[in-house]
Amino acid sequence: MTVTVGIVVFDGAEELDFVGPYEVFAAAAMLRPGALRVVTISERPEAIRSAKGLRVLADHAFADAPALDVVLVPGGQGTRREVDNAVLTGWLREVASRCRWVTSVCTGSLVLHGAGLVAGRRITTHWSFVAPLRERASEATVLDDVRYVRDGNLVTAAGVSAGIDMALWLVGQLFDPPTARLVQRYIQYDPAPPYAAETP
Amino acid sequence: MTVTVGIVVFDGAEELDFVGPYEVFAAAAMLRPGALRVVTISERPEAIRSAKGLRVLADHAFADAPALDVVLVPGGQGTRREVDNAVLTGWLREVASRCRWVTSVCTGSLVLHGAGLVAGRRITTHWSFVAPLRERASEATVLDDVRYVRDGNLVTAAGVSAGIDMALWLVGQLFDPPTARLVQRYIQYDPAPPYAAETP
């Protein structure tokens, strides 16, 4: 049985929010042939323009998307529009009901909220959206200062680059930690931010 | 004066190799309006298919690319072909001669070698390509166990995710460390690989 991971993309999705996890899942697919595949999915078949301008042609439109085991919603400016896009939130609610894992990166958790998928759950988002999400999603508990949070089958990551760590954690859950370590090694993930944070 | 960063993409370019730096430079562009722009450039105007399948429409073809201050060559399976693509290596050699910074991620350094741009320089690449690159590029010194190496105006990064660190370092050079820290904060770059490396 192949695990299918679907990454939703839309105009204004933040580039690294979706490509970070895409790379991690795709590396796992390469290292465990036949066990996993990752596909990108957009509402319509036309190219999407990401938040910073990168144009991407998704593998599938909603209409022809395969059944998913894992769904991932990235963040980005475009989420401001997508939270009110009933086509996307309706599709997501339907798909999420059959997924093993429902996940988001950054402000993607606002879209999960828009789809009614966060009630009673602990969730997180980009640091700059913790307060607005707390106000908006009073039915959930919004954590800050976490890289990602898992509550049942819902996993939400903090901003942008946090999606890489969340995807690696999920690879460890879908397979095992040694497979996740192989992915880390393949993408040479020994991060070394070059400028230390300023002391406050 | 706007600094223009050009990221070369081609069939088989590794996704995170180019999107990691793209995100970093694009975030800098957002935080310092008018001071920087980042564009993607491919040989032809058609969509490219990245190493793991992501299809991307570049902003420019070689024929209509703007003058660049920084050029970045990603790695990926496609480099095996591009090292022998005289159109790409010729374009790169010409462009590099007018750039302030010439950079690569992962096996992108093999392409820089193919373009004759590494003679007498210290360079690096993905850990699995250190030995082959040493054999091939005897005119250069290939370092391992470094995240990225700067030699004059040439900066080469190790595998895949190392491009994020290199791009952040470059933002600090193009502007200043506080700007690079703002980018780190914007992309919430407090990396936390979830599975510690196995002890050998």
Image (tube, coloured by chain):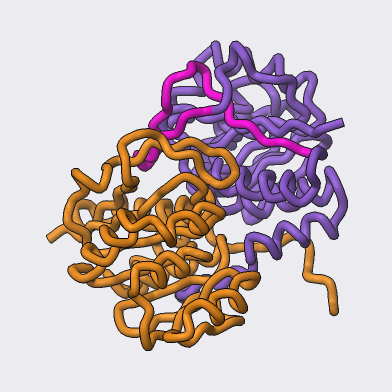
Chain colours: A purple, B orange
Image quadrant of residue A70? top right
| Residue toward you, B99 or B84 | B84
Residue A41 lies, in percent from the top left, at 58, 25
Is A170 on the left-hand or right-hand side of B168? right
Residue A66 lies, in percent from the top left, at 70, 20
Instruction: Name the residue rendered at 48%, 54% in the picture.
Output: B81
Instruction: Name the residue rendered at 56%, 61% in the picture.
Output: B160
Image quadrant of residue A22? top right
State the quadrant of the C terminus of chain B.
bottom right
Give the answer, above or below, for where A28 lies relative to A197: above
The residue segment tinted magenta is: A36-58
In the rendered structure, does residue A42 fall within the stretch colored magenta?
A: yes
In the rendered structure, does residue B128 fall within the stretch colored magenta?
A: no
| Residue toward you, A108 or B96 | B96
Give the answer, above or below, for where B99 lies relative to B122: above
Instruction: Name the residue rendered at 23%, 63% in the picture.
Output: B95
Q: How many marks?
A: 0
Residue A105 lies, in percent from the top left, at 60, 41
Is B144 on the left-hand or right-hand side of B84? right
Instruction: Name the residue rendered at 57%, 66% in the picture.
Output: B159
| Residue toward you, B173 or A24 | A24
Residue B28 lies, in percent from the top left, at 33, 57
Give the answer, above or below, for where A126 lies relative to B70: above
Question: Does the image show residue B125?
Answer: yes
Question: Does the image show residue A130?
Answer: no
State the quadrant of the N terminus of chain B.
bottom left
